[in-house]
Image (cartoon, rainbow, N blue to C red):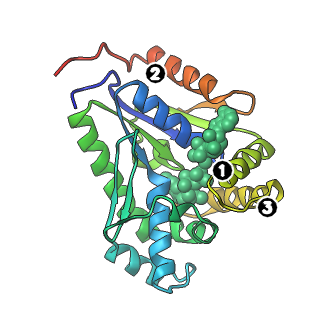
Amino acid sequence: MGHGELRGVVALDGPSGTGKSSAARRLAAALGARYLDTGAMYRAIALAVLRAGVDPEDAERVAEVARAAALEQGDDPERSTTVLDGADVGAEIRGPEVTLAVSPVSAVPQVRELLVARQRAIIAAALAEAGGIVVEGRDIGTVVAPDAGLKVYLTADAQARAQRRARQDSASGRASTVDATLADVRRRDAYDSTRAVSPLRPAADAVELDTTSLDLKGVLAALVDLVERRGLRVVAVGG
Ligand SMILES: Nc1ncnc2c1ncn2[C@@H]1O[C@H](COP(=O)(O)OP(=O)(O)O)[C@@H](O)[C@H]1O
Ligand SMILES: Nc1ccn([C@H]2C[C@H](O)[C@@H](COP(=O)(O)OP(=O)(O)O)O2)c(=O)n1
């Protein structure tokens, strides 16, 4: 695949249910860029921890599992795959057990060191091969890609985020209620933003985008506008 229209890295950070994955995939596809779902990587390690029967709060054992896990995260926005120990776990990593375990697992410094190194390698390869990549997560603008050409911090009110996530879970066949999802959203927001290592927070140079009253099309339009105004969109070069 030749170079697309995006030059450099777009970082999309923010709490759960703000629309990071939906927006990042669409933006990457629209601009012929690659896409990286860093949350899926943390979820895959959390799944490996559960499969190994390790307590997600046991940092030492969690780090051992992370080092031993064979994890491959794809960067195709049309088909983003997460392969753990040879099998695609894209559906399993969205289940409630993993969603509960991923908060303590992603707070382990050695897990973050390992995954941030892999994320940076994926970003470097994408820039060489496609010219641009959209990366979503919690610490992209602050830690993983501090020199990103554009950093956007997505927000939305907790009720809207819980309703979106509950609808998403139900559509995927996972039992869910808005109240239970709201409690999970608040739990993970608190966990992710108060942890000692790489806490969830907007980078000082991030643009904040409140998606509460925007539909997906509106979010995409806002992001394309920000990319263009930042001079990161070029006429596609063939080949
Ligand atoms: N602006 C929006 N308006 C309505 N629904 C949205 C919006 N953004 C995302 N969604 C939906 O909400 C759910 C969660 O979105 P997702 O992109 O997974 O959020 P995040 O990656 O931030 O957790 C998905 O089903 C998605 O289609
Ligand atoms: N760059 C990242 C991405 C995710 N995490 C952690 C924090 C999140 O609660 C979990 C799951 O991330 P994910 O983006 O899949 O979660 P949501 O889709 O936003 O609900 O992983 C992280 O610590 N750093």
Q: Earlier in the sequence, mark 2 or mark 1?
A: 1
Residue visible at 40% across and 79% down in the picture: 65
The image shows residue 117 at horizontal and vertical percentages of 32, 57
**Residue 142's x, y, as percent?**
49, 45
Looking at marks 3 and 1 on the same chain, the residue that comes earlier in the sequence is marked by 1
- Rendered residue at 31%/68% (across/down): 86
Vertical position of residue 135 compared to residue 180: above or below: above
- Identify residue type, mark 3: Ala
What secondary structure is found at the residue carrying circle 1?
Answer: helix
Residue under pointer 2: 227
Q: Is mark 1 within 8 Å of ligand 1?
A: yes
> Which residue is denoted by mark 3 in the rendering?
180
- Residue 235 position (above or below residue 118): above
Q: Nearer the viewer, mark 3 or mark 1?
A: 1
Residue under numbered circle 1? 171
Q: Residue furthest right?
A: 179
Residue ranking furthest to the bottom: 53
Q: Quadrant of ligand 1?
A: top right
Secondary structure category for the residue under label 2: helix
- Under mark 1, the amino acid is Ala
Residue 147 appears left or right of 186: left
Question: Viewer-proximal residue, 191 or 100?
Answer: 100
Tell me how far mark 3 sits from mark 2, CA to CA: 36 Å
- Of callouts 3 and 2, the N-terminal one: 3
